[in-house]
Image (spheres, grey):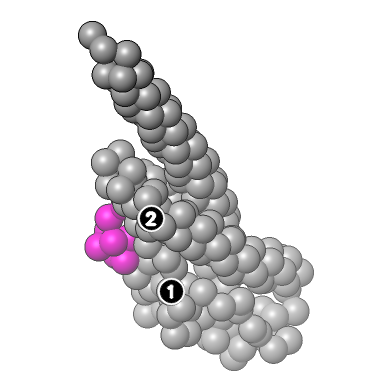
Amino acid sequence: MKNGTKNMLITVGIVVAVLFGGGYGCYKTSYNGMVAKDEAVQSAWAQVQNQYQRRMDLIPNLVNTVKGYATHEERVFTEIAEARAQAGGVVRVDGAMLDDPEQFRKYQQVQDSLGASLQRLLAVTENYPALQANEQFVALMDNLEGTENRISVERKRYNEAVQGYNTFIREFPRSIIANMSGFRAKSYFTAAEAAQTAPSVQF
C-alpha cells in the first residue's frame, strides 16, 4: 500500500473516530439533559398532586361543618359529593398521563369542576352568619385558602418545568434525539374560569 493511500486512510479513520466520539458525546449530553428535565417535570407534578390531595382531604370536614348549619342546602352537598367522587377521592395519577394531552385535559376538567363546586359551597355559607363565626369553620377556611394558594403556586411551577422541558426537546439537534428516545412534549395547566382560585368569603 502506498504511503499516500495509507495516510489518507489514517486521516479518514481519525475523522470518523472524532465524528463518532463527538456524536456520541452530543447524544449522551442531550439524553441526560432530557432525563433531568423530565424528572423536574415529574417532581413538579407530584407537588401539584400533593396539594390537590390536601384539598380533597379537607372537603369532608368542611362539608360536615357546613351541614350542621345549612341543613337545607342538599343540592350543593350532592354536587360537591359527586365532584369529589368523580375526582376519585385519592389524587394519585400515573405520570404517563403527562404524555397524553387528552387524559391530562380530562384530569384538569375534573379538578376544575371540584374547585367550582367548592366555590358554590362557600357562596352558600355567606347566608349563615353563625357558621361563619364557628371556630372549626374558620380554621377549615384558613386551611382551604392556604391550599388553594399552594395549588396555584405548584401549578405555576409545574408549567415552568414543562416549558423548560418542552423547549429543550424541541431544539435542534436535540429534537432528533428526543424523537429517537421517546421523549414527548408534555401538557400545560391552563386557566379555568371560576376555578383554581383561592376562595373568598366575607366574614
22, 192: nearer the viewer: 22
**Start-end of magenta stretch:** 98-106
Q: State the residue at coordinates (44%, 68%).
A: 189
- Classify 10 Å Cα crowding around label 2: few (below 14), some (14-19), many (20 and above): few
**Considering only order in the chain, which callout, 2 or 1, is on the residue closer to the N terminus?**
2
Residue pointed to by mark 2: 172
Between residue 70 and residue 28, name the one nearer to us: 28
Percent coordinates x, y for residue 145 in the rendering = 66, 71
Please indicate whether residue 115 sits to the left or right of residue 109 in the image: right
Above or below — where is 49 with respect to 181? below
Q: Is residue 147 above or below residue 39?
A: below
Closer-to-camera residue (7/164): 7
Which mark, by number, is residue 84? Answer: none
> Against 50, is 107 above or below?
below
Q: Is residue 9 left or right of residue 46?
A: left
Q: Can you say whether 117 is above or below 56 in the image? A: below
Q: CA separation, marks 1 and 2? A: 27 Å
Which percent across, then down, holds residue 93?
38, 47
Which quarter of the rendering shows the N terminus?
A: top left
Looking at the rendered structure, the kind of residue marked 2 is: Phe
Nearer the viewer's eye, disc 1 or disc 2? 2
Residue at 31%, 66% (x, y): give it. Answer: 105
Q: What residue sits 54% from the left and 86% below the top?
A: 123
x, y percentage for residue 153? 62, 66
Which residue is most to the top? 1
Residue 89 vs residue 126: left or right?
A: left
- Residue under label 1, please give it: 190
Number of labelled discs?
2
Determine the secondary structure under disc 1.
Answer: loop
The amino acid on which the numbered mark 1 sits, given as a three-letter code, is: Thr
Residue 42 seen in the figure: no
